[in-house]
Image (tube, rainbow, N blue to C red):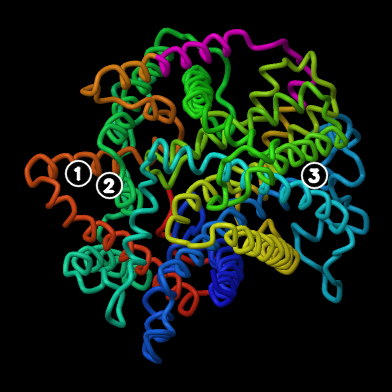
Amino acid sequence: MTLRAVLLGALLSVLICIWVPYSEFILLSSSLVTKNLDMGAILPFFFVLVVVNVLLKLFGRKFGLSQSELVIIFCMCLVSVAIPTFSLAGYLIAYLSKPHYFASPENQWGEYITKHLPSWFVPTNDNQAMEWLYIGLPEGESIPWGAWFVPLFWWLSFITVFFFVFYCIAAILRKQWVENERVRFPITEPILEMTKESRSVLPAFMHNRLFWLGFGLSAFAVLWNVGSYFYPLFPVIPIESRRIISFGRAFPGIFLKMNIPVFSFAFFANLDVLASIWVFHLLGVIQIGVFNRIGFSIGPRELESSLAPSVGYQSYGALVFMVLWGLWVGRRHLKNVFKKAFSKNSGIDDSGELLSYRIAVFGLILGLTYVSGWLHKAGMGYPAVFVFVLSILILYIGVGRLMAEGGLIFARGPLMPGNFTCHALGTYHLSAPSLAVLSLSRAFLGQGRTLGFFAFSHIGKLSDVVKNRRGILLAVFTALAVSLTVSIYYTLFLCYHNGAQSFGYWMFSYGSNISIDTAIEWMKSPFGPALKRFLFLGIGAAVAAGLTFLRYRFLWWPLHPIGFIISTIDPIRWTVFPIFLAWATKFLLLKLGGIEKYKGARLLVIGLAMGYFVGAGISFLVDMFCFPPGQGHPIVGW
């Protein structure tokens, strides 16, 4: 932990939070933060690794960045990409700006939603403050910062405390996951490989021919296609092409689309995890298709959920079981943690943890007290607060564990906590203010990729190479503070000077309307607890329990419960093909070449990912310097 590492990480955080909105909102170029680990984090870090660090070493080896410093910088980048545009800041501004500006007699938002929201919760449209956000500032007018100050102050206090809550959870679980259970954390392996100490000026991996082979193949494919930006008839390499196959009418399509970063990071996961993902995806498609053919349904599909509510609640039930099972497996560790927190003479050493267990436990308790009180003050009843906060904790801890074992850079939960809360309690038993607040909950949840637990859990693994784990708190919350400030300021700046409607982003158009309209529909036609949905939740929990038993009882059992949990969410549907290819490639390498061939192929696969990211970064520069705003060419996305 050094000052220069923190300063470099903070500088990259600023870069990320300006680069990402400019690329996605203004240029309409590459999507940089659609995944939990994406180009927005990797490319700035890779630049520091192969350019900045090399230049520092030219002045003397002692000036070069150590592996621990590089890991700290990467951790700060990992936190930063959870903030801009499609992660947090874009959702927050879009959802908070909608209620008063878009309310009309036709949509009845004023009657059902805005009148139940406290004055500090969302900004009003006084003096056309929200209208100018969408259509742009008139000449001579300045950004109405005053309209945003109070709502953003309270929302950012809530969000920051929630981030700290998940940091405390990561500190509590680190030893259990990393040391006791030895969870794989495949995503960290390429980072640790690239940051290994080298005797030369260049990083060690850059001396490997296989790395350059992979780098050259993917970079060439991306850069070759740049020619089509200037000449429409230029032949392209179809790395972004997509085909869909189907078992028949009413069956969801199976996407056949290559995604090199997904393939590269999935390659480091265990074979049983990769196999279970594509096997259970096929089984989920068959289940949905059969249900569609016989006309069975438990309701319409909801926003940011699985392919159908039936499999969504199955998956969520399995997720609940996995989280509870993980807590049971780690019960001795958790007992020691709480013993250390409440007793001075516990005899347990926590000096090597991300936080002292006392701070982690009391931070968790006080943090949850604050966010619960905040939600209640906003209008949610206590039963709704309890179910909502509990479902958030289960969702994020569960998805964090999925990614820690599965090597998935693109995943989210099968259900959103707001919808689950409504179906769990029934809208008959929820007040109008509770439903109004729940309709805007995606302002901070986004697509279930915010609040930092994915980053914090992986930081717990990466911290193995950092001597002072306690100092990581300063680094990551410096990145969080910088990212929140810069992202929100710059996003508002772009919105007011360009008009958010010109971005073509669904969150500023119809996307953020869906949850509000759904809440109004549920107010008009209330229902009780959704028993059918909970039947499928129980089925999912039972299946996950059976798979867990088989996995523990029979060493030869080839399927992991993770595949059942995430098999039918949209990100897996879009990326199941590269996951299948990663499984097949790794399987053949191990069977035909053994562990040595697999180890040799690791740098080839890392080169594929880095070449793709560097090619996409050069494509962005071509869009920025050679094309007018709004005519970019996105090549990194779903």
What kind of residue is marked 1?
Answer: Lys
Q: Position of residue 508 (x, y in %)?
A: 67, 50
Q: Residues within 10 Å of mark 3 (few under 14, many from 20)?
A: some
Contact (Cβ within 8 Å) of mark 2 with mark 1: yes
| Sequence-first tag of 2 and 3 | 3
Residue pointed to by mark 1? 586
| Sequence-first tag of 3 and 1 | 3
Residue drawn at point x = 32 percent, y = 34 percent: 273
Residue 136 placement, left or right of 176: right
Residue pointed to by mark 2? 267
When asked about the image quadrant of residue 136, the answer is bottom right
Examine the rendered structure and indicate whether residue 113 appears above or below residue 610.
above
Q: Main secondary structure of the magenta part?
A: helix
When asked about the image quadrant of residue 205, the answer is bottom left
Residue drawn at point x = 80 percent, y = 67 percent: 137
Q: Quadrant of the N terminus?
A: bottom right
Stretch of the chain drawn in magenta: 520-545
Any part of residue 312 in sight: no
Residue 123 placement, left or right of 164: right
Residue drawn at point x = 55 percent, y = 77 percent: 4
Q: Nearer the viewer, residue 629 or 460?
A: 460
Instruction: Say which element carries label 2.
Output: loop
Residue 623 placement, left or right of 513: left
Q: Position of residue 202 (x, y in %)?
A: 30, 79
Q: Is residue 591 magenta?
A: no
Q: Residues under labels 2 and 1: Cα distance?
A: 7 Å
What kind of residue is marked 2?
Answer: Phe
When asked about the image quadrant of residue 141, the answer is bottom right
Q: Residues within 10 Å of mark 1 (few under 14, many from 20)?
A: many
Q: Residues within 10 Å of mark 2 (few under 14, many from 20)?
A: many
Residue drawn at point x = 69 percent, y = 23 percent: 421
